[in-house]
Image (spheres, helix red, strand yellow):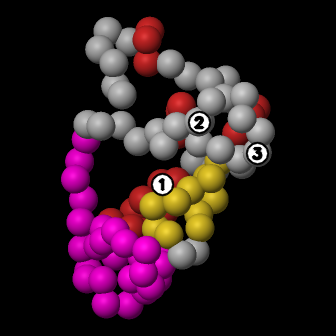
Amino acid sequence: MAAPPATSGPRPRPASRPARHGLRLKIFDAFTPPSHHGHPGIGREAERNRLLLMGLMTTAGWDFFRNQWWHYLLFNARQYPVLSDSVLPQPMM
């Protein structure tokens, strides 16, 4: 997700976009009750991965949405500068 930094309200910022590279984890992804945090029956591996993600994100200061395991919001996001990967030797996004 991406939105112009000047957009008002809690919108995704460039620093919050997922990278295209990295691990692929079994987590379960749909707009149905199995996508809710704590839903029974998604499988042990998916549940463990969701809990790992939630632990990492909330420890870093992000809040989660109860009905979407993938949806997090950074409190006071506007206090942080907009980041760019243009300073890196190889772009991440």
Q: Which residue is mark 1?
A: 56
| 90 up-or-down from 14: above or below | above
Q: Earlier in the sequence, mark 3 or mark 2?
A: 2
Disc assigned to residue 20:
none
Amino acid marked by disc 3: Gly
Residue 9's disc is 3
Regarding residue 48, the answer to whether it shows in the image is no
Q: Secondary structure at mark 2?
A: loop
Percent x, y for residue 40?
A: 38, 90
Apparent side of residue 69 relative to residue 93 in the rendered image (left or right):
right
Above-or-below relation of 60 to 80: below
Q: Is residue 27 left or right of residue 77?
A: left
The image shows residue 28 at horizontal and vertical percentages of 30, 71
- In front of the other: label 1 or label 3? 3
Q: Amino acid at mark 1?
A: Leu
The type of residue carrying mark 2 is Ala
Q: Percent x, y for residue 16?
A: 52, 40
The label number, if any, that marks residue 3 in the structure image: 2
- How far, Cα to Cα, is label 1 from label 2? 24 Å
Element assignment for label 3: loop
For the residues bearing labels 1 and 2, Cβ distance under 8 angstroms = no
**Residue 23 lies in the magenta-colored region:** yes
Q: Is residue 12 above or below residue 82?
A: below
Rendered residue at 24%/73% (across/down): 45
In the drawing, does residue 83 fall left or right of residue 85? Answer: right
Residue 46: which quarter of the image?
A: bottom left
Which SS type dominates the magenta stretch? Answer: loop
Classed neighbour count for the residue bearing mark 3: other residues with Cα under 10 Å, few (<14), some (14–19), many (≥20)? few
Dot 1 alpha-carbon crowd within 10 angstroms: few under 14, some 14 to 19, many 20 or more: few
Q: Residues within 10 Å of mark 2 (few under 14, many from 20)?
A: few
Q: Find the distance from the CA under tag 1 to the CA under tag 3.
A: 24 Å
Cα separation between marks 3 and 2: 11 Å
